[in-house]
Amino acid sequence: MRDNAIAVYYATRDGQARRIAEHICRRLNDGRKPPTPRNLLPTPPPPAELAQASLIVLVAAVRYGKHLPEVERFLNAYSALPSPPPIALASVNLSARKPGKTTSSGNPYLRKTIARHRLAPAAAIAFAGRLDYRRYSWRDRQIIRFIMLLTGGPTDPDTCIEYTSWSAVDEFADQIAALRRRD
Ligand SMILES: Cc1cc2nc3c(=O)[nH]c(=O)nc-3n(C[C@H](O)[C@H](O)[C@H](O)COP(=O)(O)O)c2cc1C
């Protein structure tokens, strides 16, 4: 039996996906107990927990062309449920800072993940993440700077920019709230 709660999960390395998941949970607070966002690491949620949710929200960061490995494991477990609840997907990456790259058709990570897992998400969006060269290892910094050079982004190694549109996160949370009301 579904317990009618929205379950919010995130996968992060540098914290932006967690911040977005927390923002969504705060926005969902409509007098009921707001959901608590849960990290997919170190322990993935048990399948029974997923099956009980009325709606699953997944906020997933991208690294080196893919969502984090725990996202793949989570979606495999989700897809294996006999009757999976609806899912809302939010991908967090830097490609989404570009116009046209925030939708499920325009964002390559979102598009490929949806196709690979044969998902039919109730909502899907890509949010632009955060670029903070000082946090990265020397190797990661050089690679990301090179990618930024190719894609017209900042290459100054002191750059720290949050590209996330918090109004877009609010809109996504409102979409989720509307899905809950329809339930
Ligand atoms: C090592 C590394 C690899 C990344 N690879 C990609 C990538 O392939 N495509 C992309 O659009 N963004 C990429 N990014 C940007 C991240 O998706 C972005 O910084 C996001 O905010 C990370 O989310 P997190 O803070 O929750 O870990 C990368 C960032 C790092 C540090």
Image (tube, rainbow, N blue to C red):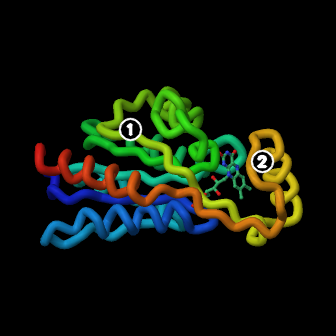
User: Residue at the location (74% across, 49% down)?
Assistant: 153
Residue 13: quadrant of the picture: bottom right
Q: What's under tag 2, amino acid-wise?
A: Met
In the image, residue 74 sits, relative to residue 156, either above or below, namely above
Q: Pointer 2: residues within 10 angstroms few (<14), some, or many (20+)?
A: some
User: Residue at the location (50% across, 40% down)?
Assistant: 102
Give left or right: position of 122 versus 138.
left
Query: Residue 179: percent from the left, percent from the top?
Result: 20, 45
Asked whether residue 69 appears in the rendered view, the answer is no
Label 1 sits on residue: 80
Label 2 sits on residue: 148
Query: Residue 132: percent from the left, percent from the top?
Result: 71, 66
Residue depth check, mark 1 versus mark 2: number of the one nearer the observer:
2
User: Residue at the location (35% across, 45% down)?
Assistant: 88
In the image, residue 30 sits, relative to residue 101, either above or below, namely below
N-term-proximal mark, 1 vs 2: 1
Tell me the quadrant of the picture where the C terminus can be found: top left
Out of 35 and 97, give the one closest to the viewer.
97
Q: Secondary structure at mark 1?
A: loop
User: Residue at the location (25% across, 63% down)?
Assistant: 28
Q: Secondary structure at mark 2?
A: helix
Query: Residue 147: percent from the left, percent from the top?
Result: 79, 45
Beta carbon at label 1 within 8 Å of ligand 1: no
Asked whether residue 30 appears in the rendered view, the answer is yes
How many numbered badges does the structure rendering display? 2
Q: Pointer 1: residues within 10 angstroms few (<14), some, or many (20+)?
A: few
Q: What's under tag 1, amino acid-wise?
A: Ala
